[in-house]
Image (cartoon, coloured by chain):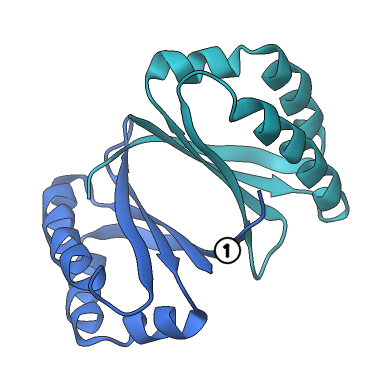
Chain colours: A cyan, B blue
Amino acid sequence: MINVIAKNFAKKAKIENVLELAKELVETTVKEDGCIKYEMYQDEKNPSILIMIEEWETMEDLNNHMSSEHFKKIVPKMNEYMDQKPELNICKKVL
Amino acid sequence: MINVIAKNFAKKAKIENVLELAKELVETTVKEDGCIKYEMYQDEKNPSILIMIEEWETMEDLNNHMSSEHFKKIVPKMNEYMDQKPELNICKKVL
């Protein structure tokens, strides 16, 4: 099992645009092979902080996701609305 | 529903100590009222990065947790083994 925690920092004026694109990304991604969970969380104090929490069966499934047509179409658009690079952690559950 | 994502940065030589204390914390915390999820994830490339993912029914439950005896006993000990302050995000699920 592969767990991804990706913290994104949206430009304040573009939060809604990011959420709209993320909605499209989530709807397509949850149908992919090996996708167990693909969810987005928003910080209560700083709504610019948008954290994606993902769970994949294998690293191959995650790699397939990142080279999928919808990922390559939507993620670059989202990146235009970001203030800084995301913090990406690929993890295993330990507890 | 309240979601907490807490990224911790353990000193390299103290990772095992942090995991041991976290195990004790998780075992007690999952029995608390309002605790839906309390899990720890470790970054595959940088094992010093330990991310707690929590889910609580209400903010009151989270506050009760943070003022519980076991939290006040264990967390200061864990903090001694950290390289820097944790990044704490209290979030709501948006997607």
**Depicted B84 relative to depicted B59: above or below:** above
Q: Residue at x 72, y 38 (%)?
A: A22
Q: Residue at x 76, y 25 (%)?
A: A74
Q: Residue at x 79, y 36 (%)?
A: A21
Q: Residue at x 72, y 19 (%)?
A: A70
The part of the image, by quadrant, that contains residue A3 is top left
Image position, residue A85 (x, y; %): 65, 37
Image position, residue B48 (x, y; %): 28, 44
Where disc 1 sits, the SS reads: strand
Q: Is residue A11 left or right of residue B10?
A: right
Image position, residue A43 (x, y; %): 62, 62
Dot 1, how many residues are within 10 Å of its Cα: few (below 14), some (14-19), or many (20+)? many
Q: Amino acid at mark 1?
A: Cys
Please state which of residues A63 and A39 is positioned toward the viewer in this rendering.
A39
What residue is pinned by disc 1? B91
Q: Which chain is indicated by disc 1?
A: B
Image position, residue A47 (x, y; %): 71, 61
Outermost residue, right side: A13
**Depicted B72 relative to depicted B28: above or below:** below
Q: Is residue A57 left or right of residue B3?
A: left
